[in-house]
Amino acid sequence: MTLTVQEEAPLAPLTTLGVGGPARWLIEADDEGGLREALGFARSRGAVLHVLGGGSNLLVADRGIDGVVLRARLRGITVTRTGAGRDARVLVRVGGGEPWDALVERATQEGWAGIECLSGIPGEVGATPIQNVGAYGQEVAETIVAVEALDRGSGEAVTLSAAQCRFGYRDSAFKREVRGRYLVTAVTFALTPGGAAAVRYPELRRALGETAASPPLAEVRAVVLRLRRSKSMVLDPADENGRSAGSFFMNPTLAAASFAAVRARVEAAGVLSAGESMPTFPGGEGRVKVPAAWLIERAGFAKGTTSGRAGISTKHALALVNRGGATAEELVALAVRIRGEVRARFGVALLPEPDAWGFTAEELAALSG
């Protein structure tokens, strides 16, 4: 068992946004025994415990975290084959601290279908079920069969089924009814050997070519990486838009009645060119998904907009970026301005995608209220 503890540890270098203050304590543990010891450490000090993965979906307040930040570095991959023919599956059990994109790369190389469209997403495997990570028409909820975790209160090891995770769009029980209860230690995915790639997303279909009925998984991965790179959605220190948390806002999904009201406001706002209509996607269960980036741009926030040392990516309106030396306060101020204008003009309340640590209730309300 290995456990290291640092006091007043800088967090900004551990996040892709590169902003935020220090953690009162930063703990790294590489096995379940270390995780239990970290839980005891936080409990004995009456401190709130936060779990830090790859830092790619996180905004830390400038004041930092007056508590414990835990980096769970559990590694290891185990592969088991089950079934035959059309029922054949590869069960891949992955430690929560494994890099996500390395897993996707291996799956595409091995010919295991199920996560190929999730290429290039930064972070660690343990975070994927919490967020129900998704991109280009695919979500981890489609392949997750089990999530192993430690109960923070009892230290007991538990295994949750996919049904118990209650996955939704960029959502899960880990963000709602059992928020803060578990530490994810491993995730098991059921992938399909020799399976077809999931080419559902219009942009991905166009990039692959409409005639590509069943492209190889490796080709799908390469195209997804190219698309993400064109939007500065692949980590690259040399990219002027590289210091971001990816998509800062989620695409809103609206009930039919709400969507009709929003569409009417869009049409009345005069933001559509001749013959243009508001883009939409199926949102599931009779709902409609609207691209947040489109709403942001039509609300007057163009790509490349700057606000002090913060700004909007020059390549994608959903990404807020640190232009160099930005503070969390500057990023939040820009996010609040964007939310306010989109809501005022179109009646849509955008919700932030990154976790926000160290903020007051009032600050959080401004971001997501």
Image: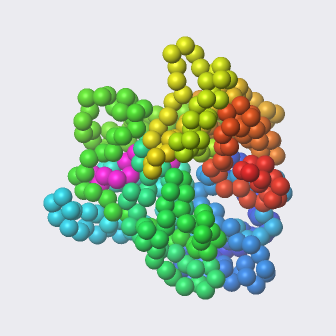
State the residue at coordinates (59%, 41%): 258
Name the image quarter holding the N terminus: bottom right
Residue 289, percent from left and from top = 52, 41
Viewer can see residue 102: no
Looking at the picture, how far across and down is residue 212, in whole percent? 26, 32
- Magenta includes 116? yes
> Total label count?
0
Q: Which residues are magenta?
A: 111-121
Most foreground residue, 193 or 38: 193
To which quarter of the image does residue 300 belong? top right
> Viewed as shown, does residue 332 lie left or right of 133?
right
Quarter of the figure with residue 254 = top right
Residue 156's x, y, as percent?
55, 85
Residue at the extreme front of the image, as rendered: 257
Specify whether residue 48 is painted magenta.
Answer: no
Please tell me which residue lies in front, 65 or 4: 65
Going 61% across and 86% down the picture, which residue do you hit? 154
Considering every residue shown, the one lying at the far top of the view is 274
Residue 353 in the figure: left or right of residue 361: left
Which is nearer the eye, 71 or 360?
360
Residue 48 percent coordinates (x, y): 74, 72
